[in-house]
Image (cartoon, helix red, strand yellow):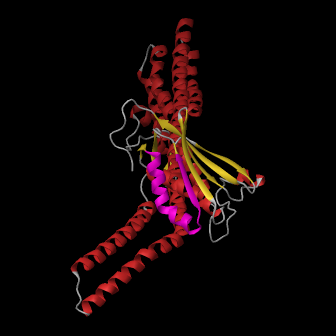
Amino acid sequence: MKKGRVNGSGIEITRKERLRGKDGSPMGIIGQLLLAKAKTGIRSPHFLIIAGLFIVFSYIYYGVLTSFHDIYVIIFFYPLIYTAIVYRVRGVIISGIVFLAILLPQALLYAQDLLSLVRTLIFALFAFLVSGLGATLLNYLEHQIKAYQEILSLNDELNGYIERLKNTRQQLIQAAKLSSIGQLSAAVAHELNNPLAGVLIYTKLMKDKLAKDSFDKEQMQNNLEKIESAIEYCTSIVRGLLEFARQSEPLLRPVTISRAIDKAMSLVGHQAKMKKIEVVREEAEALPLVIADFNQLVQVIINLIINAIDAMKEGSSLNIRTSEEGVWVRISVQDTGYGIPPENMDKLFNPFFTTKEEVKGVGLGLAVSYGIVERHGGRIEVESEEDKGSTFTVVLPAHKEETPPQKTSD
């Protein structure tokens, strides 16, 4: 059974795969040499080949070559190199001992002079050193390649985790959107009820007129225009909710802050009306654009407005201000509600932390808003005093350019 480990995709990575390129091809000559390493010791066919080479070269050295043995000792260089590739350092040491056992009898007993003996030993030492160096280098390269492949594998795992985190983040943003829509549903239902009731009344009037054959073209046209206006109003509210609820990829582009606030108010303004909360907008003139995802910025503003409305009693006031401060654009949502206790200030942006009733909130709005603003290069500041109210300020970097953009997000 092959030994390996499982990568982020659940695929087992074996030693051979780690020494191959991404396309499955060996890493050149070095890859071939590294893959040639024996895994079964003396049971490997390589052991028999090396033993055979030593036997053949020993026969040639003693039986065939009748002179200059000190020079021909270099023929043993080949099995030593083979051993270095297949068995690495340990194999070089063992084969070196066998090599000396073959060489020394002839070198000591039949050497013609001292120079011949020294030359033989120098050649043997050279073969041993070269093969040992080669084995050490191959071991080093194998460790380096393994480390490199491990880094690649870990990088793949990390990319997988990042992708999963990105997907989870988008799911949280969508969950917070749906939570906000759930809180808006009662206000929207109330807001749709009035125009639909008008449509029903005018439809019945027209039906009665037709039944009595008292058809008045001008009055009928007037009634139809009122019905059309009511239907368009309902359609705009429903369309706004659908656009806000739609899950889409983040798209960063120049955004006009006032338009984002307009969009948010079109969705939550009805809820403020139901509680008879006065909404005051104080917007700076010539406010710079910001680079943002329009829908996500609207989501942040909606979350802050909903929280402010929930924190206030009927007849209170809600103030929405925009201003420019250096290279920053500030959007402040100030309520006159019950405020935030000091012990909860550090928990505001924790996921699933909420002070609302269970039916109203799940504790995702501020946490998701904080993440959205942070990814846009900004921050959220909070000021609060119990029984006096709270101010949440979104601070985003202003988009500065010499020529105003031709197209901005709506």
Whether residue 39 is visible here, answered yes or no, is no
Residue lying at 56% horizontally and 68% vertically, measured from the top left:
183
Q: Is residue 263 magenta?
A: yes
Q: Is residue 13 toward the left or the right of residue 211 in the image?
A: right
Location of residue 371 in the rendering, given as x and y in whole percent from the top left corner: 57, 49
Is 202 positioned to the left or the right of 192 in the image?
left
Residue 39 locus on image (x, y percent): 53, 44
Segment tinted magenta in the rendering: 256-282
In this rendered view, identify the residue nearer to me: 172 or 289. 289
Classify residue 354 as left or right of residue 81.
right
Seen from the viewer's position, the closer of residues 177 and 55 is 177
- Residue sitting at x 54%, y 64%: 180
Does 239 sit above or below residue 250?
below
Q: Is residue 237 above or below residue 261?
A: below
Query: Please, which residue is most extreme toward the right here?
Result: 343
Q: Magenta: predominant secondary structure element?
A: helix
Which residue corresponds to the image point at 43% horizontal and 36% vertical from the top-left?
31
Looking at the image, residue 101 lies above or below residue 223: above
Q: 35 or 231: which is nearer to us? A: 231
Q: Could you tell me how many numbered marks the image carries?
A: 0
- 390 in the magenta segment: no
Q: Could you say which quadrant of the image residue 273 lies in?
A: bottom right
Left or right: 171, with 240 as reference point: right
Q: Position of residue 48 (x, y in %)?
A: 48, 40
**Position of residue 142 measured from the top left corner of the image (x, y, whole percent):** 52, 35
- The answer to whether residue 34 is seen in the rendering is yes
In-front residue for pair 41/306: 306
